[in-house]
Structures are given as C-alpha cells and as structure tokens.
Image: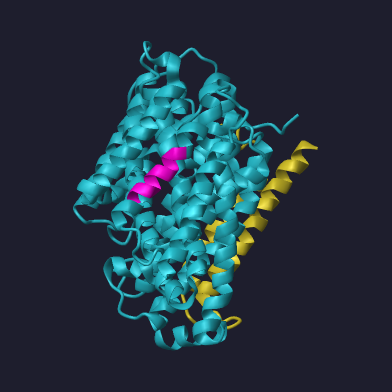
Amino acid sequence: MSKVPRVFRGRRHLLWLLVPYVLYLGALPLVNRVHPVVFGIPFLFFWMLAATLATPLAVWLAYRGDRRRRT
Amino acid sequence: MNAAVATSVFGVFMVATVALGLLAVRGRGSQGGLTEWSVGGRSLGPVFIWVLMAGESYTSFSYLGAAGWGYNFGAPVLYVLAYLSCGYAVGYVVGPMLWAYARRHDLVGITDMIAHRYASPRLGALVAVLATVCLLPYIQLQITGMGVVVSTISYGAISLYWAYFLGFAVTTGFVVVSGLRGSAWVSVLKDVLVIGTLGFLACYVPFHYFGGYGELFRRLTEEKAQWLTFPGHTSGGLGESWFITTSLLNSLTVVIFPTTVAGYLSARDADALRRNAIALPFYQVLLLVPILLGMAALFVVPGLTGAGSNLALFQLITDSLPAWAVGIIGVAAALSSIVPMAVFMLVIGTMWGRSVLGAVPRLAGRQKLWSQVVVVAAGSLALLLTYTLPNTLVRLSLISYEGMAQLVPMLLLGLLWRRLTLAGALSGLLAGGAVVCWLVFTDRDPLWGVNAGLLALALNVAVALAVTYALPAPADTRPDDEVLAQEALPAA
C-alpha cells in the first residue's frame, strides 16, 4: 500500500497542479468579497480572472518538471 | 426582412457545417475501422486536440445557462470556470495516462478500459449502459438549447420543433460518416466563430449600453452587489461550500467523462495532451463574457424569469445588433450545441459498438457499423423524447454529472492500484449511484451545503475499499504492466 503508483513516482513537480485548487477553492473564503475593487472589477471576479490566467502557468511548471527529468 | 437575413446566414453555415464534417474524411475511404471513426485513428496533433477539446467544453450551456445563471444568481456560475481549470490541471496527468493505456491495449473508450482492467467484458457492458443513461440527457440539452437559439435568432421564422430537428439532422449528417475527425474539423469553424463573436460582444455590449466597462462595474457594485459574491442572489443554497465541493467533484469527473476521454485518445502522442493542458485554460476566459453580459442584462432587460432568463444574452444581441450579425452569433451558438452533441452521440455509439454489441461474439465483426447504427438510434431517441416527454430527460440530467462521477474510483483508482477488485469497484459504484439518485430525486442536493455527488463519491470509495479488503484477492495472473496504467513516455 505504501508503494506510490508508478505514474507518480519521482514526479514531485506534479504538486504544481494543485495550484488551481488552492486559488479557486482553498482561497475562496478570503476572496468572497466585492471590495477592494481592482481595475474597476469587483474583487471576487478579479480573483477568478487572475486564477484562470495563473492556471496555465502552474500546469506549465509541472510540464517543465517532466521535461527536466527526462533530459 | 430581419428574419430572412438571419435565417439565410444561418442556413448557409449549417450546409457548410455538414460539408466540412464530411470533407474531414475525404480520401480516407473506410480504412481504419472503429479506431479511425471513434478516436480519429489516434492521429490528431496539438492544434486539433485543442480545438476539439475547447469545442467540447464550450456547449450551448455557455451561451444560455452561463448567461442565465449570471442573470439569476451571479457569482455561483463561476463554478464552471473553477472546475474546468482544475480539471485541465488533473487532465495533465490523467490524459496521457489514459491515452497510453488505450494505445497499448488497443482500446477506444472508458468502458473498454474498464473491461480490460477487470478482465470482464460484462462489466464493460454494464458500465456502457449506465453511462448511456447519464449521457442521453446531454443530447437533449443540446437539442433544446440549439432549438431556443435558432428560433430566437431567426426572429421566430424557424419554429422550436423544426429547430430541434435541424440540430439533430445537421449533427447526425456528418458524425455518422466522419466520426471524431469530422467533429474536430467542425470545431475549427466553431472556435473561430465563438472566439470572434464573443470577443466582439465583450467589446461592443458594455460600450453600447453603458459607455464602457467602468460604468457597468460601477452600477453592478452599487446596485447589484448581491450578485457579486457567494451565495449570490436568491440562489437557494449555492454558497461557498457548495462551490468548493461542486468544483472539486466536477474537476475529477470531467477528466473521465467519455467525451473528454474521446479527445484524449485521439491524440497523436502524449506530449500533445500535456501541451494542451497548458493551453486549454486560456479558452475559459471566454466564459466570463456570457457571465458578465448575463449580469449586464439585469439593467437592460430586467424581469426575465424561468427559461426566459436563459435568453438574457440573446435579448441584448437581438436588441442591439443588425440581423446579419445576429445570424452569425446564432451560428456560433448553434455550433456550440452541434459539436458537443456530435461527440456525445459518437461516444454512446462507440460504447455500444465496442462494449455492449461488440461483446456478443456473433456481432463482434462489425463494431464500427453497430456504433454508427447506435449513433442514429441514440440521437433519434433523444429527439423523440424531446418532442414527447421532455421532462423525463430533464429530470435525468440532474443526476448526469454526479452519476458519472461515481465511475472515478472504478476507472482511475483501478488503473493505479492493483489490489482493487471487481467486486469492490462495482459495489462502490452501485452504492454511490444509489445515493446520488436518492439525494437528487428527493430534492436533498446540496445536502448540508455539500454537493450530493461528492458525498456519494466518499461512500463509493469507502465501500470499494471495504469490499476489496473483506474478500480474498481473486486469481488474476496477468502481470501489473498488463493491468495498470503506465506513465506515458515522450514520443520517440
């Protein structure tokens, strides 16, 4: 049971993939608010937009980890 | 006059859609069999994969439901954005894993994978039947969604009933012949139109009605603050915990959803899927447009209720734009029904052709033909039910996603953990499925503010583990490599 499935072995950089979960779900209680308004956008909607733009970056960091491991 | 212009634009594009779908397989003859038809011969490159998977995620819900939720509730609609983004991150691992498994063992869908993993064609057939029950309502949702759009943008010239039929006919017209490759080609047209029209609307509508974004946001903040945070406006329990649990559950479900998996399996190599997982979240920015415009409609067309609120976006469009532009936006919305509908019909056909009818030795020789027959049958059934008993499938659609979620342990845990037994996985699936049906049909979803499907999934896993450990391990002599998923290696 303690054996890590082969798909994940040696791929600690996959933890980057948890970033969207932290931004969208984990942080929700802190960001569920109208103020401060950023660039005119109510805060919750601004945060969701920022999280949507940050997700590709997080997935790319995981991808970079995979590439490094292979070379 | 308006009706004639918009309807003509629409008609031309629908003919073009069928033609494009059919052209996709020109010169390929009937080679390749089921693998070519169901998963494009596992040959699509990164661009096609992106177009196809973005196309699948942007359905008629995005134009109608997202605007309608924005109009009625506000913030809760953001769950769509959250679960798709999280799902793409999970898909970074799961996509290549399923792709490699399917390629290695020559499989074409999740029912096929399950049958292989547990060495039980019967289990594959059972899962195919259950998954079909969850998928049929989606075909109807696309048919009715397209019907509403088409009858609105034709200014009523095309009646709802004809519009339903059109949706079915156009989709069936190409998918039966050209399968997933045809859907990918049509997705190209769709994505160009969707990105173009939504980009235009994002610039045009706020300036036309409010003089700019600043004023729109100022009025929302001052007059509609209730819409801007959870639990939103009169959403009936769609608070923070509902958002978190629903997004979590859906993000795990979307990666095994049969239509998503069809996209994964069509990839040329695993790296195309990994790059795709990076690029896909950008498409979700477009989802903010109908959400925002749905909320803007609060000021322009107040007082929409029920099904009328789903048309919040189209009310703005028909109110402020000339007929030809209305027609083009209508085409983009209609294609957002057609592409997902095509893939839904395709995966139902594939599941039956491979795992149900294909499991009968006497029929196994013609799997592609049976799949095509089932595509027409499933589409016709959904169309017929739309006409005669629309509420049956609407009610069923409530359990679709949460029901499909119950396959996550059987498929993903099964592919990662050898000890999980057929008896355990099946017991978990049935327990989870029963809880979903019970909670949803007795109006207890969300329960204690938590998504009922997630509660059912927890029970599902608990039962699967308990049964697995309680019974002796069965004698399956195949090596681990044969049964479990491997990490997909980079293309040579």
Where is residue B234? Give x, y as percent: 30, 74
Q: In the image shown, does B256 or B265 lie closer to the viewer?
A: B265
Say which chain is cyan.
B
Instruction: Report whether B438 appears left or right of B401.
Output: left
Using the rendered image of the protein, determine whether residue B484 is visible from the camera's viewpoint.
no
What is the quadrant of the N terminus of chain B in the image? bottom left
Q: Which residues are magenta?
A: B164-173
Instruction: Report whether B459 appears left or right of B297.
Output: left
Q: Residue at x 34, y 36 (%)?
A: B378
Total residue callouts? 0
> Magenta-highlighted stretch: main secondary structure?
helix
Q: In the image shown, does A38 or B61 lie closer to the viewer?
A: B61
Q: Residue at x 48, y 47 (%)?
A: B339
Q: Residue at x 38, y 18 (%)?
A: B359
Q: Colour of chain A?
A: yellow
Where is residue A16? Give x, y as percent: 63, 52
Where is residue B50? Give x, y as percent: 61, 47
Q: Is A8 located above or below residue B393 in the figure?
A: above
What is the quadrant of the C terminus of chain B in the image? top right
Q: Quadrant of residue B476?
A: top left
Where is residue B361? Give x, y as percent: 38, 11
Q: Residue at x 40, y 19 (%)?
A: B358
